Amino acid sequence: MSDGETSIVRRREVRGTGDAQAARVNDSGLQSQYQPYKDAAWGFINHWYPALFSEELPDDAVEGIQICGIPIVLRRVDGKIFALKDQCVHRGVRLSAKPTCFTKDSISCWYHGFTFDLNDGKLSTIVANPDDPLIGTTGLTTYPVEEVAGMIFVFVREDDYPLDDVPPVSEDLPFRFPENSERFPHPLWPAAPSVLDEHAVTKGMHRTGFGDWRIACENGFDNAHILVHKDNSIVNALNWTLPLGILPTAEDCIEVIEDDDAPKGMMQWLFTDKWAPVLENEKLGLKVEGVNGRFYRTSVVLPGVLMVENWPEEHVVQYEWYVPITNDTHEYWEVLVKICPTEEDRKAYDYRYKTFYKPLALNGFNDCDIYAREAMQDFYADGSGWDDEQLVSTDVSPITWRKLASRWNRGIAKAPRGVEGKIPTTSLRMRRTAEGVPPGYKVQKIEE
Amino acid sequence: MDDGAQVLFAFADGVERSVTVKSNETILDAGLAADLPLLFQCKSGSCSSCIAKLIEGETRQAAGHTTLLRSEYEAGLRLLCQCEAVGNCRLELGYDSEAGSVRATKAKAFVDEVEKIASNVVRLRLELAADNWVDFRSGQFFQLTVPGVGAIRSYSPATTPRELPMLEFLIRLLPGGVMSQWLTDQATPDDIIDIEGAFGAFFLREKVRAPHILIAGGTGLAPMLSIVDELRAQSGRKPPVLLSFGCTDPDALFGLDAIKLRQQWMPGLTARISVDNGATGDLLSGNPVDAVLAEDVSDPNTVAYLCGPSRMIDAAFARLEALGVNPDNIFAEQFVSSSETGSNP
């Protein structure tokens, strides 16, 4: 062998082709059907995501967040909200770290004074180089914004995704009732409200989840995970007796919704004969008698929005988002929606939220989901978990979701360049963590 | 004394470049000498990579042959490697001035998998060796050197640049062909193969919103799969895509699972599979050109990509034009077996 040839080497160990043909449900054929989903570690891009609650962005305020690896700065001027890429074209500084605005229609980089038009993102001037030829030739990507019922939604797009192609926010929000009541009857509970309804009021919270957004998302509608909730306070306080689990009994236990110009997602036929509660496991000597709990129903739509109807009480609905920040952090949103036409209704809802929904449901019940998701994270962190997991029949829910998400996403976010979290172990990130500020969603503002 | 003629090249992105062409050199040679980003490969009038459209002026056929049809020649099409300038002329190129910037490079690759996927088709999966890299656009082709023989054969990847360092080729087995023999008798995982590329002016024009019609015969499916995946990854609303694929008989079909998968991933993808003989079930009887119907061309801006044997390309051109597709929006790559011309099987 010549010297030249000895230098030809493989770039890495080739991963075995795997043995996914075994008894598991997710053999390699099925896995390839949701390959695009397996590729979506940084999320689905070109979708509407919640960015902030309205009250987090008062007039003149500036906030920086990150979604799907894209840093975004939000500024509210005279009530109207603008969103731009939060990364100065000059040297990549985040504008939101030290907000500097000299006019109502612009935002300037606090470092070297590059100034961007809020409407179109163009570089409109440079504080100390007003005649520089770069002005007008470059700029920052802008993001469409909608404010609905106390929430700010941003259309997180690729730089070249045409603004003309941006769909209405309703296409990325859960199914609505009563217009879907005939298609998806709900004899056991009233029509779920929608954030888009008149007089809708949202209450809730968002916090950073330390893990892959997909793991978090799948937890929400995973019908086999009732087990983790059996000791939750809400279950005991309200004297619920939950089954051990529920199993699909029909091929059509889940309905996939692919209507034109409407949300794409799936509805689970819970509390019908298409799912059966499991009440006994003889081998373990487990038996549940007198099942008694809430009737609820879960559905999910792109880009990963959960709806739990009739939860935590009648006339209230819970929405959840698992907004990708990086490939191993996400912003977990828990939002309750109720129709409150009067001030009195609002007050009562607010009181109920503070004294019951928040402590027992959003915290008590869902905190348990958070540690359950974290427990899965290491298995999936290097990507191998998606190949190696051994799924069973109850996992029809995540599998159906993965397939429909592979089909209807508007784009798979690419691993970003030059943003926080791309390299998880920068010294700056470690220093902040050591100082008690873990990686998160909002920019860390500079304090003087 | 030869002052030469001024030849102006107009690229699709509006960039214009002018060079002086002497009377004894081809327009291609003059352009390349001036470092223009012109696409070319065989320089012998076969591969059509260097195709351009004469808008003004006159050219003269240099010695050698051209694969252009008479009708194409009359429509102004020229192969720059076979053309000399008679006087000043203006030529339009169907690609932008960046396209030629995908420079052909040589690389070493390891064989990952060799699998016979139809009666006469092998799928060859390669992985570029460490420190080796290539670049290409969906639809372009690479030259593979048959190990131990040294002969060169051209194939288009079925994968996209996003899958690099992995490359996948679909190769038709030809009785007695040197590549075919290597693939069936010798090729094993971890073998090393030399590749060079990318070449060719046949590649997906990006961000076209109009409907796409892709017609593939035999292993002409490979670049079409790459194009479909590229369209899927494209930002913005996806255009409707019709993939019409055909083989001689059911035994010769392949890639149907790959097509089905893409239909699942891409709601706007329609696929029609044809066989000349023995159609059953969902298979259409006939060829992939006939499977394209009048109602598939409802948009006057429809674009079409054709890849397969020259007979199929000619028939597809004629049919698409008859159905109202603008000939400027039809892009074709002929697959010619090495026994016929010595290039681009």
Image (cartoon, helix red, strand yellow):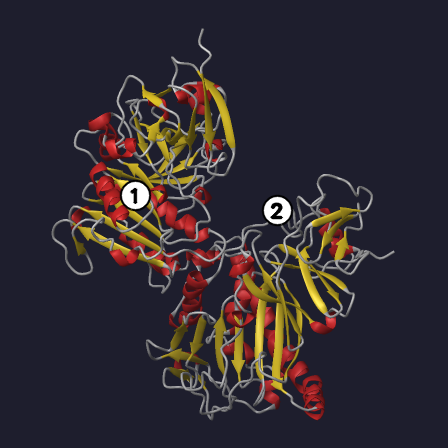
Examine the rendering and report whether any part of residue B253 can be seen. Answer: no
Of A151 and A32, the residue lying toward us:
A151
Q: Residue A440 lies in what quarter of the image? A: bottom right
Of B227 and A317, the residue lying toward us:
B227
**Relative to A311, does residue B12 appear above or below in the rendering?**
above
State the CA–CA distance, disc 2 to disc 1. Answer: 36 Å
**Relative to B322, does residue B145 appear above or below in the rendering?**
above
Residue located 43% across and 71% down the image? A397
As drawn, is A428 to the left or to the right of A141?
Answer: right
Q: Residues within 10 Å of mark 2 (few under 14, many from 20)?
A: few
Indicate which disc residue A77 carries. none
As drawn, is B69 to the left or to the right of A240?
Answer: left
Mark whose residue sits in front, 2 or 1: 1
Indicate which disc residue A417 carries. 2
Of B288 and A68, the residue lying toward us:
B288
Mark 1 falls within which chain?
B
Determine whether the residue tagged by mark 2 lies in a helix, strand or loop. loop
Examine the rendering and report whether any part of residue B49 can be seen. Answer: yes
Q: In the rendering, at what x and y percent does residue A274 appear?
A: 36, 82
Please, what is the three-letter code of the amino acid marked with disc 1? Leu
Q: In the rendering, at what x and y percent does residue B53 appear?
A: 37, 32
Quarter that holds the N terminus of chain A: top left
Q: In the rendering, at what x and y percent does residue B142 appear?
A: 37, 32
Q: In the rendering, at what x and y percent does residue A284 appear?
A: 43, 79
Mark 1, residue position: B306
Mark 2 falls within which chain?
A
Q: Residue B316 lies in what quarter of the image? A: top left
Quarter that holds the C terminus of chain A: bottom right
View extreme (top): residue:
B1
Of A438 and A200, the residue lying toward us:
A200
Q: Are marks 2 and 1 in contact (CB under 8 Å)?
A: no
Q: Are marks 2 and 1 on the same chain?
A: no
